[in-house]
């Protein structure tokens, strides 16, 4: 009797999981299928089999002067890459400063960062836009990168990681060996922090790659746009006159690199999410 | 052991944290002050003409409250809760299944990887994809009509319920995997001997879930709720792209940040400022709860209660 109910439960669980997986994958399946079909084929209705226009669509997308997508990919890569590097380095540096040293304002500094841990950046967007206009940094990629030096959530992750994995004796030992403070951070602390840095670099890269709100307000000229802004322009007034094959192909270009990175590093990423979720 | 007496390393602490605080001051604190200052002025562009800045006191705040702000706050809340309730229920269910040692799930790793995938997808591209898929002549309607599920195409984006449900569905898909993994970590942190003891006492599956798992992970559930609320408050990309910034139909999917975006695009500094301050106040309250939960070693108050009881006892004796 008990065995039977266990079996029923198992069947239900697998059914639910398969349904949810289907839901997660189905839309991307249609996306990729549709990216291989021409506008005319798409007008005829949905087909579960891929078409033959993959290369035509790709060619059309890459050579559209109205939406310079190659430039968009490069801009997105620059911003996301720089952000990932800056966020991880400076968050580790800040965390190390508070973790390894004793100073008067240490507690206050930590409390302050914890207080702004989840403060949305949107609430200061107005002042931010006015500020960068005054600094003549509007319509440039710089204001999308520089503010990430101060990333409270990454700081907290790094700080927690140091508490569990960076013995303070090690710092002391380095000092006795005559290592300078900044040198100790670069040569000893950073290598120990590598796993945490890798996890946070991935999340920052993805977050920055997908970021839309602030970039859309900062960037005005076409050749400085990042990918999400270009995707948004697809939704503009002339949507109906657009080649649908091209639209699907552009969405594919925006999404697929992240999916590939994820599939390669999935185990690592899923563990990283769990790591961030466990609270002391 | 050699002690570095007289050598103070304190200055290095300041040097290392300086970039963070300098950046935060320049790119967040100064803008915050400027945002608050602007909220008290009538200051906007009408065509190429600048109106103001003239002192308005609380005028902008009052105008927002009496006009559309409550409606947009309600929209945001409805779309958030429509996504959040299924998100947390499904996540709890999956997390309980995944962490049950006696319950064999085939392809567990595969399922974990798949359910987390949508979280990493560019929200704006995801919304664009949904717009194309759920349009009146799109693939979803194609499939529904050709298989005879519905007689004629469903106009998803033209009804309030349809548009809001699409936004909620996207939010659900993007976040349930993330919650599942978080909750799994929390459940795995429960001492396994508690479950073993319960099983020896003949505890059923549902009793185990409701009497042990749920109370044990309550702190993390609360944490998830609050961080999700903050996320919901920031809802923008999905409804913005799906409705082209219009919040169609009839502005019923217009969120608070879409409204802010509208004022920012139109360079209405006064209104954008007042709206930002409202958002800042709500965020600050939520931030306070997150702060409390992260820095408090006694999240459910049990230790404090024990201490109070002890003190009361002592006082009674004396």
Image (cartoon, coloured by chain):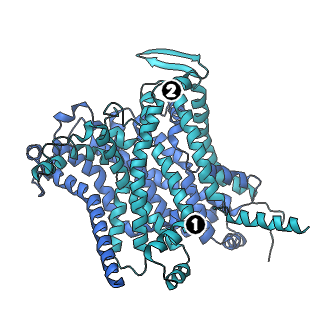
Chain colours: A blue, B cyan
Near-viewer residue (B251 or B210): B210
Between B100 and A169, the residue placed more toward the observer is: B100
In-image side of A24 versus B15 (left or right): left
Label 2 crowd bin: few (<14), some (14–19), many (20+), radius 10 Å: some
Q: Residue at x 54, y 72 (%)?
A: B189
Task: State the residue at coordinates (52%, 70%).
Answer: B211
Tell me if I can see residue A223 in this picture: yes
Which residue is the site of mark 1? A161
Closer to the camera in the image, A193 or A47:
A47
Write the residue at 70% across / 52% down.
B14
Disc number lying in front (2 or 1): 2
- Which SS class for mark 2? helix
Of all residues, the one furthest to the front in this rendering is A1
Q: Which mark is residue B64?
A: 2
Q: Is residue A155 above or below residue A7?
A: above
**Spatial distance from mark 2 to mark 1, Cα to Cα?**
44 Å
Seen in the picture, residue B106 relative to A53 is either above or below; the reply is below
Q: Which quarter of the rendering shows the N terminus of chain B?
A: bottom right
The subunit carrying tag 2 is B
Q: Which mark is residue A24?
A: none
Q: Position of residue A43 (x, y in %)?
A: 10, 43
Task: Give how far across and how far down residue B209 sits, in percent.
Answer: 47, 71
């Amino acid at each position: 009797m008990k065995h039977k109910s266990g079996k029923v439960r198992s069947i239900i669980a697998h059914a639910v999981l398969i349904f949810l997986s289907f839901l997660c994958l189905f839309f991307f399946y249609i996306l990729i299928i549709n990216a291989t079909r021409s506008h005319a084929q798409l007008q005829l209705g949905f087909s579960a089999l891929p078409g033959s226009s993959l290369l035509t669509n790709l060619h059309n997308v890459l050579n559209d002067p109205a939406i310079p997508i190659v430039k968009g990919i490069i801009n997105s890569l620059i911003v996301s890459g720089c952000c990932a590097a800056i966020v991880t380095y400076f968050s580790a540096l800040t965390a190390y400063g508070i973790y390894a040293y004793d100073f008067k304002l240490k507690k206050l500094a930590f409390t302050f960062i914890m207080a702004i841990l989840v403060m949305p950046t949107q609430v200061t967007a107005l002042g931010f836009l006015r500020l960068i206009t005054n600094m003549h940094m509007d319509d440039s990629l710089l204001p999308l990168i520089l503010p990430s030096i101060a990333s409270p959530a990454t700081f907290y992750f790094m700080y927690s990681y140091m508490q569990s994995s960076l013995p303070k004796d090690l710092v002391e030992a380095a000092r006795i060996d005559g290592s300078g403070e900044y040198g100790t951070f670069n040569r000893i602390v950073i290598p120990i922090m590598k796993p945490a840095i890798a996890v946070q670099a991935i999340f920052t890269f993805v977050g920055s790659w997908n970021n839309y709100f602030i970039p859309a307000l900062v960037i005005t000229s076409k050749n400085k746009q990042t990918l999400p802004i270009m995707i948004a322009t697809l939704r503009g007034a002339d949507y109906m006159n657009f080649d649908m094959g091209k639209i699907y192909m552009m969405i594919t270009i925006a999404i697929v690199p992240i999916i590939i990175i994820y599939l390669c590093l999935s185990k690592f990423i899923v563990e990283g999410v769990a790591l961030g979720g466990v609270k002391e | 052991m050699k002690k570095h007496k007289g050598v103070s390393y304190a200055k290095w602490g300041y040097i290392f944290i300086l970039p963070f605080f300098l950046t935060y001051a320049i790119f967040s604190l100064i803008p915050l002050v400027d945002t608050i200052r602007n909220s008290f002025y009538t200051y906007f562009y009408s065509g190429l003409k600048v109106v103001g800045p003239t002192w308005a006191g609380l005028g902008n705040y009052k105008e927002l409250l009496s006009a559309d702000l409550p409606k947009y706050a309600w929209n945001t809340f409805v779309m958030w809760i429509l996504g959040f309730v299924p998100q947390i229920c499904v996540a709890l269910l999956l997390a309980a299944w995944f962490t049950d040692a006696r319950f064999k799930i085939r392809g567990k790793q595969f399922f974990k990887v798949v359910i987390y995938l949508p979280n990493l997808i560019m929200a704006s591209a995801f919304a664009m994809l949904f717009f194309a898929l759920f349009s009146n002549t799109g693939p979803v309607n194609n499939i529904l009509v050709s298989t005879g599920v519905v007689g004629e195409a469903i106009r998803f984006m033209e009804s309030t319920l349809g548009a809001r449900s699409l936004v909620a569905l996207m939010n659900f898909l993007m976040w349930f995997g993330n919650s599942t993994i978080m909750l799994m970590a929390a459940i795995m942190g429960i001492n396994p001997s508690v479950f073993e003891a319960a099983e020896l006492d003949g505890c059923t599956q549902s009793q185990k879930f409701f009497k042990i798992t749920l109370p044990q992970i309550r702190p993390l559930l609360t944490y998830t709720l609050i961080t999700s609320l903050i996320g919901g408050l920031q809802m923008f990309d999905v409804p913005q792209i799906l409705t082209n910034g219009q919040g169609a139909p009839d502005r019923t999917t217009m969120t608070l940040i879409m409204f802010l975006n509208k004022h920012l695009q139109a360079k209405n500094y006064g209104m954008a400022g007042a709206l930002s301050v409202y958002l800042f106040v709500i965020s600050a309250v939520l931030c306070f709860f997150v702060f409390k939960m992260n820095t408090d070693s006694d999240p459910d108050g049990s230790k404090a209660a024990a201490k109070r009881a002890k003190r009361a006892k002592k006082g009674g004796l004396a």
